Amino acid sequence: MLLAIDIGNSNIVLGVYQKRKLLTHWRLLTQAERTADEYGVLISQLASAKGIGVAAIDAIIVSCVVPPMLGMAQELGETFFGLHPLVVGPGVKTGMPILYDSPKEVGADRICNGVAAYEKYRDACIVVDFGTATTFDCISKKGEYLGGAIAPGLLISVEALFQRASKLPRVEIVRPKEIVGKSPVQSIQAGIFYGYVGLVEGIVQRIQKENQAQARVVATGGLAPLIAPECSVIEEVDEFLTLDGLRIIYDRNAIQELKKRAQD
């Protein structure tokens, strides 16, 4: 079984695959102060609750955009599972040309999203990931990573408004009943929610226009199910896009390793 780990700034998303099938998944808070042992025990307990023993995990792949957490993930694999994790980064075979000025600067999660989206649709794609940041990633019809855009995430925006505007309260992000709020809370919710709907629609439409081609638009990330239904440009929500990208990249590297051994 393959343990796929996506370490983001706010959450760690984990999934256990048996070949191509996602057996189970979990979402944990990203806490840099937690040790590999603590995460190991937690993952073991979660897996056990699903009838999966630690010994059943025979491979690990990691994407990480939080540098201090990378050492923890490697230690987790080596000491708790007895495995050397494959870390998505320079030198790892993704099967996708990265047409960024500096390819190594592209976040590992964005590469995973692009790989999974193209594998699924085999066509030009735009992936909108609603995470700590809201990212837009463009994949060409040939399966090339073209680049994208990054905007502050919804939670960051709400927190910044609360911290910098002394009379405004911290609010929950929900779809408001109406655009014209009748209280500060309702007004903030309307501005944040519909502001992001407009942001996503505007950026996607500009990307389509700039590239002079229609691309399939897929959303992922924790807040995608909330925002996507109101976005006219989003065609599908795929909760497990990043995990699927990790699984695909692992498979491609495993095949490459087998070819090397056969040649040797």
Image (cartoon, rainbow, N blue to C red):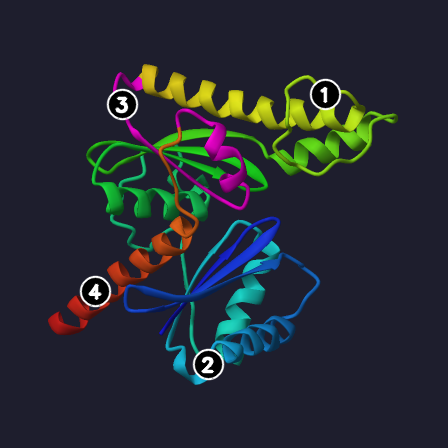
Give the residue at x 48% y 76%. 50
219 falls in the magenta region:
yes
Q: Which residue is mark 4?
A: 255
State which mark lies toward you, 1 or 3: 1
From the image, state whether disc 3 or disc 2 is nearer to you. Answer: 2
**Residue with the mark numbered 1:** 181
Quarter of the rendering occupied by the N terminus: bottom left
- Please provide the residue range marked out in magenta: 211-233
| Between 172 and 63, the one nearer to me in the picture | 172
Residue type, mark 4 in image: Ile
Q: Which residue is mark 2?
A: 51
Q: Amino acid at mark 3?
A: Gln
| Relative image position of residue 224 (x, y in whole percent) | 50, 40
Is 182 situated above or below 173?
A: above
Residue toward you, 253 or 41: 41
Q: Amino acid at mark 1?
A: Gly
Query: Mark 2 to mark 4: distance in Å?
Result: 29 Å
Nearest-to-viewer mark from 3 and 4: 3
Any mark on residue 147, and which? none
Q: Which residue is label 3 attached to?
A: 214
Q: Earlier in the sequence, mark 3 or mark 2?
A: 2
Q: Which residue of the protein is positioned furthest toward the left in this rendering?
A: 263
